[in-house]
Image (tube, grey):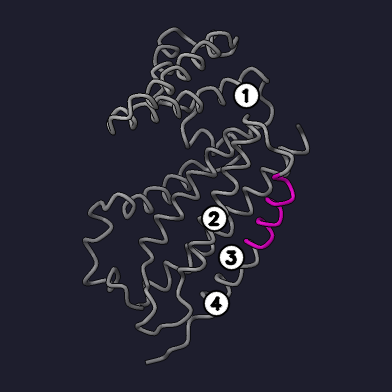
Amino acid sequence: MNNQLSKEYVIARQELENTLKITQEFSIKNSSKLAVHSVDWVLSALFVRMCTTARTILLSSPRSKCTSEVWDYASHGTLLRNVIDALNSFMYLAQLGISENEKNCRFLLFSLHDAVTRKKIFEFRGSLEEAKLCSEREDEVKQDLKANSFFMDLPEKKQKHYLKGTDPFLLSKEEIIEAYGGAREDFLGLYKFLSANAHSFPMGYFKMSENDFGKGLHSQIEEEYTTMILQLTSSHLNVAKQVYANYQEQT
């Protein structure tokens, strides 16, 4: 058995390691400027989250074909989908060319979603005091939304929908990608591929035997898909850094 990893895999892993060093340094450099709980704070938190998840992908990616290494592109793909989701939210909140009222509206919808979700979890756990505090925060955010001119200009039906606190986005994931010049089809193709494993849909395991993957051992398809995931993780981190830099220059 040839124990050598492909050149493409080795390069992809090294590239992610280098990209992480740059993005983590960028994050540390800018973290002190973003202490207030606001859009800037959320962007800082999302950026750190992306770096942390990417680091998990890097450190858990195999260094050899030995049986002591775990080859599991599906789990790495699920982590990559987390990076993509975080980047999608990041791009949404960092979008330039929108009014201050719309920017604040987007942040308030995130805050409302957080309060409503936390309240439901505390209620489920029987932590009524914590649930009450979340309910009070929910009411405060709703009042702030009703004082936001951008939100109040939305159709009444949409206002009622968003005040439920179950949908924090004014745009779909695809619309966010398109707002930055990305291609809807490319995004959806990758996202659906990664989601098949994240949700354990049939596509994620129906071909396990014939395509030789999903057993934790090295195979050609495991190495090829892991290479792709390492490459995509690097490219998404680079996009996040560029979006962040552009945002800071303009605000």
State the separation of the CA atoms marked 3 and 4.
10 Å
Residue 79, horizontal then vertical, whole percent: 43, 55
Q: Which mark is residue 16?
A: 3
- Looking at the image, residue 64 sits to the left or right of residue 193; the answer is right
Please name the amino acid that badge 1 sits on.
Answer: Lys
Is residue 201 highlighted in magenta? no
Q: Which residue is mark 4?
A: 10
What is the three-letter code of the residue carrying label 4?
Val
Q: Nearer the viewer, residue 12 or 64?
A: 64
Task: Estimate the spatial distance between the alpha carbons at disc 2 and disc 1, rounded to whole Å.
Answer: 26 Å
Q: Callout 4: helix, strand or loop?
A: helix
Q: Earlier in the sequence, mark 4 or mark 1?
A: 4
Residue picked out by circle 1: 103
Cα–Cα span, label 4 and label 1? 41 Å
Image quarter where the N terminus lies is bottom left
Whole-number angstrom distance, CA of label 4 to CA of label 2: 21 Å
Judged by depth in the image, the label closer to the viewer, 4 or 1, is 1
The residue to which callout 2 is attached is 52
Earlier residue among tags 4 and 2: 4
